[in-house]
Image (cartoon, grey):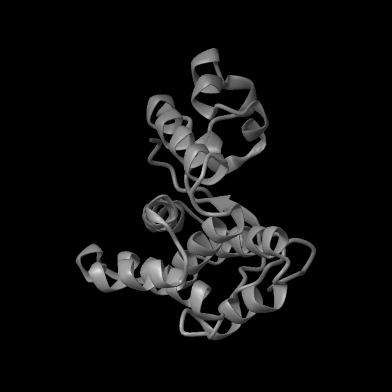
Amino acid sequence: MPDTILDLPPHDVPVVFTRDQLDWLPWLEPMAEQDLTDRHMAGLVDAARAKSAYFRLLARDPDALQARTRADKDIFYNPDAGLPRAERELAAAATSRFNGCIYCASVHARLAATYSGQADAVQRLLDEGVGADLGERWNAIVAASVALTQTPPAFGAAHVDRLRRAGLDDLAIADVIQAAAFFNWANRLMLSLGEPAAIDGKAA
């Protein structure tokens, strides 16, 4: 990783949780798009991610980035059984809301709202926090995600039992755990490498 801190241009840093699309500005120099080699592109997995400053920053360690991206895609995009996509995104949004990652919360709350059709409930999570009443099934998913995020030993049999009572089978419960665990790590990485920025004055 480079050790040069970037001098960012003036910008509005969002201070409230939102489903608006946000930008993200790195504090360290990402790779230039034209400098990405075949190895870096393999690490990105999706060529379109070369447009993202975040992924070009992580591409400085392409092997770690490739492992990270393949895990991400399997947790969130694999349709073989388990939790519906909307609720995987809900777990990521709840984790990000609890961790204070405004950028990640915006992305995954937007996806949770899109896939579930329950934009009002997702917005309550953003506005009121992880204690918002979203209905028992979603409350159970949020509670399990928050326990894992706060400290993994806080998650236990009671959370699993509650998820089962809410209708989740073992594969769906595994998806809650994986989505929350992944974003518990991803939030901390993103929060330590840069900051969100409003686009066109929105969400400032």
The quarter holding residue 11 reads bottom right
For this orientation, the residue located farthest to the left is 153
Q: In this view, does 67 lie above or below 138?
A: above
For image coordinates 46% across by 71% down, the residue present is: 166
Left-right relation of 151 to 177 = left
Q: Which residue ends up furthest to the right in the rendered image?
A: 200
Give the quarter of the image for residue 162. bottom left
Q: Which residue is drawn at 64% across and 21% down?
A: 34
Relative to 37, residue 73 above or below: below
Q: Which residue is drawn at 37% across and 56% down?
A: 177
- Farthest-out residue, top: 38
Say how many tags the image has.
0
Residue 84 on image: x %, y %: 57, 54
**Looking at the image, which is closer to me, 150 or 21?**
150
Residue 98 visible, this angle: yes
Locate the C terminus and report the quarter of the image it occupies: bottom right
Q: Name which residue lies at 49% across and 16% down.
A: 39
Q: Where is residue 82 in the image (x, y as percent from the top left)?
A: 48, 49
Instruction: Name the quadrant containing residue 87.
Output: bottom right
**Residue 188 seen by the camera:** no
Closer to the camera in the image, 170 or 12: 170
| Position above or below: 111 against 13 | above
Pick the quarter of the image with the N terminus.
Answer: top left
Q: Is residue 131 left or right of residue 38?
A: left
Q: 126 above or below 196?
A: below
Relative image position of residue 74 (x, y in whole percent): 49, 38
The spot of residue 85 in percent (x, y) is: 59, 52
**In the foreground, 199 or 66:** 66
